[in-house]
Image (cartoon, rainbow, N blue to C red):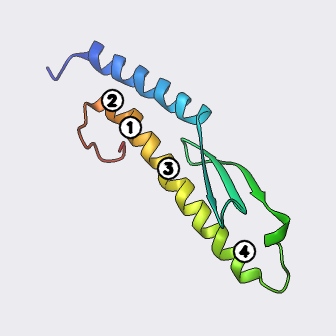
């Protein structure tokens, strides 16, 4: 007999709750001094993108692209850190592949 089935069910229930919480929580990242702002959930789903009109320059599309890449990458990192923190509380800091 492997493990306690009730313990497994409790962990699964907590995992579902954490996943729901991560879907409701957001993090924000920006680039270019706030010219590009990204809001993303703890499940890495983009909720909002804000662009300051000053960075929408048809003569310099490359700058806008660079700012967006930087903001998205920072948002993803913050979202992943949020998820790792929440899941780390469940796993007691254990590194479980696919969960952290």
SS under mark 1: helix
Nearest to the eye among marks 2 and 4: give it. 4
Q: Position of residue 43 (x, y in %)?
A: 55, 43
- Which numbered tag is attached to residue 4? none
* Residue topped by disc 3: 78
* Marks 1/4: CA–CA distance: 32 Å
* Marks 2/1: CA–CA distance: 7 Å
Specify whether 22 is left or right of 55: left
* Residue topped by disc 2: 89
SS under mark 3: helix
Write down the quadrant of residue 91 in the picture: top left
SS under mark 4: helix
Choose between 65 and 11: the one closer to the eye: 65
* Marks 2/4: CA–CA distance: 38 Å
Q: What's the residue at 50%, 32% (across, down)?
A: 19
Residue at the left extreme of this rendering: 1
* Residue topped by disc 1: 85
Q: Earlier in the sequence, mark 3 or mark 2?
A: 3
Labelled pair 4, 3 in contact (Cβ < 8 Å): no
SS under mark 2: helix
Q: Earlier in the sequence, mark 1 or mark 3?
A: 3
Choose between 54 and 99: the one closer to the eye: 54
* Residue topped by disc 4: 64
């Amino acid at each position: 007999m492997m493990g306690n089935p009730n313990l497994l069910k409790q962990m699964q229930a907590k995992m579902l709750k954490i996943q729901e919480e991560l879907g409701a929580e957001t993090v924000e990242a920006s680039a270019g001094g706030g010219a590009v702002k990204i809001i993303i959930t703890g499940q890495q789903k983009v909720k909002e993108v804000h662009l300051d009109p000053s960075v929408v320059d048809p003569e310099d599309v490359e700058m806008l692209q660079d700012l967006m890449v930087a903001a998205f990458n920072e948002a993803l990192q913050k979202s992943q850190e949020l998820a790792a923190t929440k899941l780390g509380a469940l796993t007691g800091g254990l590194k479980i592949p696919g969960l952290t």
